[in-house]
Image (cartoon, grey):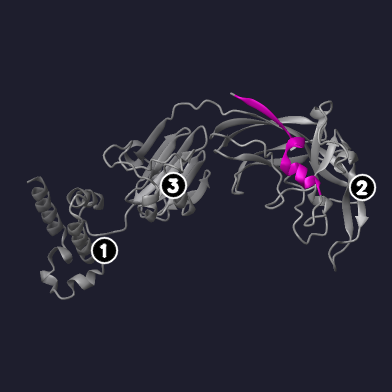
């Protein structure tokens, strides 16, 4: 596995946060260059370079505040080229920042203690640091956390990253300098706490083990008692739970002819959902040659080829993404396309498939396949004529198609008893085979 160290002093975002701008002159929102515990006014004033090879391993950028959207700092030199498991090693420590009493920048606000970026010393607190995966679109995904003390230390986390994600550390206990703030509640005449970042080392991705999956296991047969011990209060007790167990497997985008309630039992899963109308933008594969029955998208979600599949960009615009942890549940509507990525070493999901009560007239998917077989190769004019009939009799207002007929003369268009529906299906089967 490849290993590379990324120094805080080299990160463009941290460098940019060191400088005041016309939009921000608050020292709480600015980074502080330090060596060890000592601030570097010459670097702060940009009279010296950001880094010196002689002191590189002890250089750091310190911050007196946590981060939020629009004021975030991250290790922008690193971006995961492929999805997978990575080992992240962080060198960081807590620091203490001197303060001075300053009038408020905002009328009608109180004066307060503010950081003096030219004066720092050894930290006095233990501070939690939270790591997030940071995507190009600005979304943050929780990876883990660790504590830093006044003594510099190295912290190691093993994380799962998606393609294109970078790493955003957040000194999460420190205050957030939202617009209109007075100052940090932790600041006093004695100073205020901060966190200093030296470097981040990334190793990975780890070789992926073979995908293992046990899918759609009916619990009534193979795990008796599971349904009774884990009933879904949202559904009828007759709806059977099914189990899905595996490692970091990926299920290609597909759809199911059911309503679906997916509940994560262990691990983490990332769902990307698309409405049925996205079918033309997902580049669906053949109906006959499929890994598990349903047709699937031929697009690689890890590395989509937009030259080959340009409409996939439009599908992503219509998509919904949810990442589930144990105890989370997701409703997937009938025939919605969904791509599923399992993110943990072991993942367990229970799902409940059901369809609303309806007359038992046959499987819609079978009718769809027969329609494709019978109609797709017809001349355009013939297909247009059949489309008109389908719109009128199948997809249009049912009353408009039957209002002129007495109820006992509506036949297949009216209400059928189970025996009548079964007899018609048998007759249709004979006609298909003849």
Q: Nearer the viewer, mark 2 or mark 3?
A: 3
Q: Is 374 above or below relative to 195?
A: below
> Residue at the location (46% across, 40% down)?
305
Nearer to me, 182 or 318:
318
Label drawn at residue 190: 2
The magenta-colored residue range is 2-19
The residue labelled by disc 1 is 395
> Residue at the location (85% across, 65% down)?
109
Mark 1 and mark 2 lie on one chain; the one further toward the N terminus is 2
Where residue 370 sits: x, y (%)? 19, 49
Nearer to me, 285 or 178:
285
Sort mark 1 into few (<14), some (14-19) or many (20+) by Cα contacts within 10 Å.
few
Mark 2 and mark 3 lie on one chain; the one further toward the N terminus is 2
Cα distance in 3D space between marks 2 and 3: 59 Å
Label drawn at residue 360: none
Residue found at the very far bottom of the displayed protein:
404
Q: Is 315 above or below relative to 95?
A: below
Label drawn at residue 310: 3
Where residue 90 sits: x, y (%)? 71, 32
* Residue 4 drawn in magenta: yes
Mark 3 and mark 1 lie on one chain; the one further toward the N terminus is 3
The image quadrant where one finds the N terminus is top right
Where residue 166 sits: x, y (%)? 63, 39
Where residue 291 sits: x, y (%)? 33, 36
């Amino acid at each position: 596995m490849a290993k590379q160290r990324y120094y805080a002093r080299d990160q463009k975002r941290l460098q940019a946060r060191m400088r005041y701008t016309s939009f921000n002159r608050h020292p709480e929102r600015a980074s502080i260059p330090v060596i060890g515990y000592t601030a570097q006014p010459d670097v702060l004033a940009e009279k010296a370079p950001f880094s010196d090879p002689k002191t590189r391993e002890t250089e750091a950028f310190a911050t007196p505040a946590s981060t939020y959207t629009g004021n975030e700092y991250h290790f922008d030199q690193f971006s995961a080229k492929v999805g997978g498991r990575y080992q992240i090693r962080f060198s960081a420590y807590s620091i203490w920042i001197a303060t001075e009493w300053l009038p408020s920048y905002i009328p009608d606000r109180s004066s307060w203690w503010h950081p003096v970026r030219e004066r720092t010393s050894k930290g006095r607190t233990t501070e939690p640091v939270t790591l997030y995966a940071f995507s190009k679109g600005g979304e943050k995904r929780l990876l883990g956390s660790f504590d830093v003390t006044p003594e510099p230390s190295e912290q190691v986390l093993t994380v799962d990253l998606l393609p294109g994600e970078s790493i955003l550390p957040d000194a999460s206990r420190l205050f957030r300098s939202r617009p209109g703030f007075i100052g940090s509640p932790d600041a006093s005449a004695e100073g205020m706490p901060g966190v200093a970042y030296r470097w981040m080392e990334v190793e990975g991705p780890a070789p992926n083990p073979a995908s293992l999956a046990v899918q759609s296991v009916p619990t009534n047969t193979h795990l008796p008692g599971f349904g009774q011990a884990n009933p879904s209060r949202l559904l009828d007790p007759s709806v059977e739970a099914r189990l899905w167990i595996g490692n970091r497997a990926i299920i290609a985008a597909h759809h199911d002819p059911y309503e679906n309630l997916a509940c994560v039992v262990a691990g983490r899963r990332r769902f990307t959902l698309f409405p049925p109308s996205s079918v033309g933008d997902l580049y669906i594969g053949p109906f006959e040659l499929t890994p598990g029955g349903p047709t699937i998208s031929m697009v690689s979600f890890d590395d989509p080829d937009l030259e080959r599949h340009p409409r996939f960009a439009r599908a992503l615009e219509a998509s919904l993404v949810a990442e589930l942890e144990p105890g989370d549940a997701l409703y997937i509507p009938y025939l919605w396309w969904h791509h599923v990525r399992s993110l943990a070493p072991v993942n367990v999901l229970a799902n409940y498939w059901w369809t609303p009560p309806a007359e038992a007239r046959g499987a819609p998917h079978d009718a769809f396949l027969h329609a494709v077989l019978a109609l797709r190769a017809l001349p355009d004019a013939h297909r247009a004529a059949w489309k008109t009939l389908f719109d009128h009799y199948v997809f249009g207002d049912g009353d408009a198609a039957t209002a002129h007929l007495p109820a006992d003369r509506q036949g297949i268009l009216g209400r059928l008893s189970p025996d009548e529906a079964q007899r018609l299906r048998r007759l249709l089967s004979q006609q298909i085979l003849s």
